Structure formats: C-alpha cells, structure tokens
Image (cartoon, helix red, strand yellow):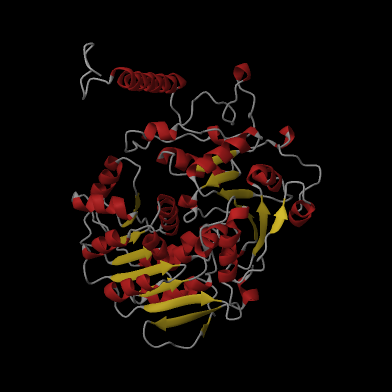
Amino acid sequence: MPRDSLQLRARATTLAPQTPELPLTATTFAELGVAPQITQALDSAGITSPFPIQEMCIPLALDGQDLIGQAKTGTGKTLGFGVPLLQRIDSDSVSGAIPQALVVVPTRELCVQVAKDLELAGSVQGTRVLAVYGGRSYEPQVDALEAGIDVVVGTPGRLMDLARQRKLNLSGVKVLVLDEADEMLDMGFLPDVEAIVAMLPSARQTLLFSATMPGQIVNLARRYMTSPTHIRASDPNDDNITVDAIEQHVWRAHAMDKPEIVARVLQADGRGLAIIFCRTKRTAQKLSDDLADRGFAVGAVHGDLGQGAREQALRAFRSGKIDVLVATDVAARGIDVEGVTHVMNYACPEDEKTYLHRIGRTGRAGASGVAVTLVDWDDVPRWTLINKALGLAFAEPVETYSTSDHVYTGLGIPKTVTGKLPRADRTRAGLAAEEIEDLGETGASAGKRAASGNRSGGRDSGRGKGGSKQSGGRSSGRSGGGKPASDSAGDDSKSEKSGVSRTRNRNRRRTRGGQSGKSQPSANSSE
C-alpha cells in the first residue's frame, strides 16, 4: 500500500512531555542526511524512499540522540537503526579492530536477517558485519572477531558466552541497538541483556526498537538510555494496530480436516510464497511431511531441527526452491522474505501479540497479503479474547470444512482442486536441491536433529527408487540433512539395540528382583 495513500504521520515524544505530531516530508535517504556511500548501496538494491519509522528516526539518530522506535511489524525498523549505525562506523578501522556497534536480537533467524540487511547497506563503504548466534561452531565466529569486525549482530546467549570467554571485546562499542526488545522480554532474555549492557562503555548511543512497548521495556529504557526520544509511526486515523494491507480470514475448523483445508488454500490463484505457523514442533513436522506427500515443495523450521537444517529451509524458501514453509513461532520474527502472499495459523495463536507477529510476515513494506487462521472448537474462547483486543470483526469464526463454498470463493480457489497438488504444477526444485551447510553444530544430537524430517515434496516427490519416497528436488542421494544413509541406518540400529537392552534389563528386574537392591528369598523361606 503506498505510503502517501495512508497519509502517515510520525509522533515524536520523549519519556516526559509530548510534542505535536510531525508530518513526514522527506522523500529520499539523501534528504535525511544519509552518507552517499550508504545511499548508493541502498539504491543498488532498489531501496530509494524511506518508510515513516525510518524517516523520523534517521535524522535524530544521526545527531547522536538515544531513541525508542515503535512501529507496526513489517514497516522497516531495521534500516531505521541500521543506517545511522553504519554512518557512525569509522571506515578507517584497521585489521583486528574491535566492534564499534552491537545489535542484540532475540532469535537466530532475526540475527541472520538483520546481519544481511546491514551488510547490504554497508557494502559500498566496506563495513564488516558478523552474525553471532547459537547452534553454530564457536571457532569461525572467534576467528572473525580476531580478524576484525565493525558490527556484531547477536543473540543474548552467544554474546554472553563469547564475552565471558574474553573473545568478544565490547569496550569500543559506540552504538547499542536492542531490536525486538519486547520479544526478548517474553523469552526471558532481559537479565542477559542487562548483563551485556553493563559491559559496554557508558558513553554510547542506545537505540531501542520494538513493535510493542510494555512497561518493563519502558523501565529498561529509563535505566540505560539518556533522555530517549520515543518515535511512533502510525496513521492518525487508524486505531487498529494490525497491518491494513492484510486480508484476514478466521475459520472454525476440525483438526482432522485442517490438512485438507491447507492443501486447498495453497492452490489459491495468485499465491506466491506461503508460511504456515504451528503451535508445537511435532505438529509442524507432521504437517510438513503431510504436505510433502501431497506434492508441495515444503520445508520446516522448528526447535527439533539442527541449525543447519533450519538455515537450509530458509535459504530454499528465499531462493524459491520451496514455496511453503511450516514453522513454529521461532520464525515469527526474523523472516523477512519478499513475495510472501499467504500466512496461515494452523491453530489459534496464544495471544494477540503472537497473532500480529505471525500475520506480519505478509503485507510487508507496502505489499498486500492474505492471512488465514484455523480455530479449533476448544480455542474459540481464546480467539474471542484476541478478536476483542484487536478490534477485529471475527467474534464468531465461521464453521468451515474443506468443501465449504466460502473457502473457494473467498480466496479465489478453483472448484476443481483436490487435496493434492497436480503433478503438472510440481515445478519447484524442492528442499533437497538446497545444500545443507556444515555449521559444526554444538550439541551431541545436532546431527540427528539436522537429519530429521528433510522431506520437501517438489518436482520429484513420490518418485523414489523401489517405490520409496524421496525428499524432493532434482536428485536426492542423501538422507535427511546431508548425512549418508548408511550412517543414519547405523544410528537407528544402535538406538534399536540399546532399546532392546533396556527392555531386557527391566524384564530381569520384574522377574528376578534385579541385582541392585533386595536379595531374592531363599527356597526355604517361610514366605
């Protein structure tokens, strides 16, 4: 949706008195005072006009002020802090230089996304950006820090580990950014964030960005920021905090019919990329496998997968090798992919904030999108609370089945579609066409997690040798996450043998009392 059609204004306030709303007038980054090297990098990526949150934040941040930036999800907060941060970097830094800026984010996926955006904006001036997060080997991150890094983007846990090991020197940080601060609060990272802030120089600029501003975040700002200015970009005529460009549908559905509904929604006319959010890891993997069996090019992102498998799925999704991503809320923030037209909630979200974060994966940066939420009968009371909090028009979700007329007419789904994707439409390469990267993952079971559930549908779905199903893509000579099939079989056989051994030991204890406690009664015992 064009910015001018919304007549958006941004409100600038401090944590004390409020100032009047200020109209947005600038039309280019250069007019905001952005350095030519950064504007050149943005222009090369097709980014020429700032969004409201960027337009208000950038000039104040360039003056060195502490800021709190608040805007709807998907409205460009990353460049709102990224551009001023990059402009304050000393481009003459030598090899082995310590970081000059630190960006703290709540999730691994958001860490990767923010680092890529900063690399893009700083590509012409040669800014060195490093993403630091768990699930990857320490050694490459330590080597990069020793070679010299200008900007570090990281999750609280890995940042704390590296700082405590004295591998990460934070004494030179001039700019601190806390991105998605409310999410870090929800995930319990606030103590780690406070510990990290305590390691930084007191003379620094602090920028805090978030979609929502709960009281604890305001208190955090009061403790660690100096007279921060609160920037809020909003439409003065819009009391609803959901993104207006998203067409929303809420249906009451039976659990056993949900896969059929999803399969039909994924065949809507004009559908581009789609993300389906599930409440649990098990449901996400089960749905991903089911959609792969139906012929869709699909990948999964959830906590039971190793980091390599998660990044493989995200890369395949961004490159178009798969067009359906099934995820838990681990990916609700951090997935900023162009071309996402449909988002589905496979079950009712936990609260209104989760709902906003999920559907915010579509309708980003002025684009339009469709959000479909499937509500179980038992979850109707929860949905009623979400609907009331957001002021939506779905107080009573429509009872819906995969054969209901409004499924087809409301989303432009041809009446001829079934629960399986026609073979002629299976044109995507599939997840197996994307190489899985060896990250040297931490954790004993990392390899096994990476190898679990790598079935993606796609072009070759259902054409495995000997009637077995392969994982999609042009050729699928690997098992799961890149581990040889023989190794996987070996792990399975070991697991099976250990299970048999444990069962035998239990049987011995049941029949003979075992060897670890009470002695067996003798044959002459009075018992």
Q: Residue 165 at what x, y percent from top left?
A: 19, 49
Please indicate whether residue 250 sits to the left or right of residue 511 in the image.
Answer: right
Please indicate whether residue 471 sits to the left or right of residue 498 in the image.
Answer: right
Q: Residue 515 at what x, y percent from top left?
A: 23, 20
Rendered view: 453 above or below 118: above
The structure residue drawn at horizontal position 41% and vertical position 78%, both measured from the top left corner, is 230
The answer to whether any part of residue 96 appears in the image is no
Rendered view: 217 above or below 114: below
Rendered view: 242 above or below 407: below
Q: Foreground residue, 296 or 77?
A: 296
Q: How many marks?
A: 0
The answer to whether any part of residue 525 appears in the image is yes
The structure residue drawn at horizontal position 32% and vertical position 18%, both measured from the top left corner, is 508
Q: Residue 67 at what x, y percent from top left?
A: 37, 74
Query: Residue pushed farthest front?
Result: 526
**Quadrant placement of the N terminus:** bottom right
Q: Residue 90 at what x, y percent from top left?
A: 29, 63
Q: Foreground residue, 131 or 108?
A: 108
Q: Quadrant of residue 391?
A: bottom right
Please indicate whether residue 171 sits to the left or right of residue 328 in the image.
Answer: left
Query: Residue pushed farthest top?
Result: 523
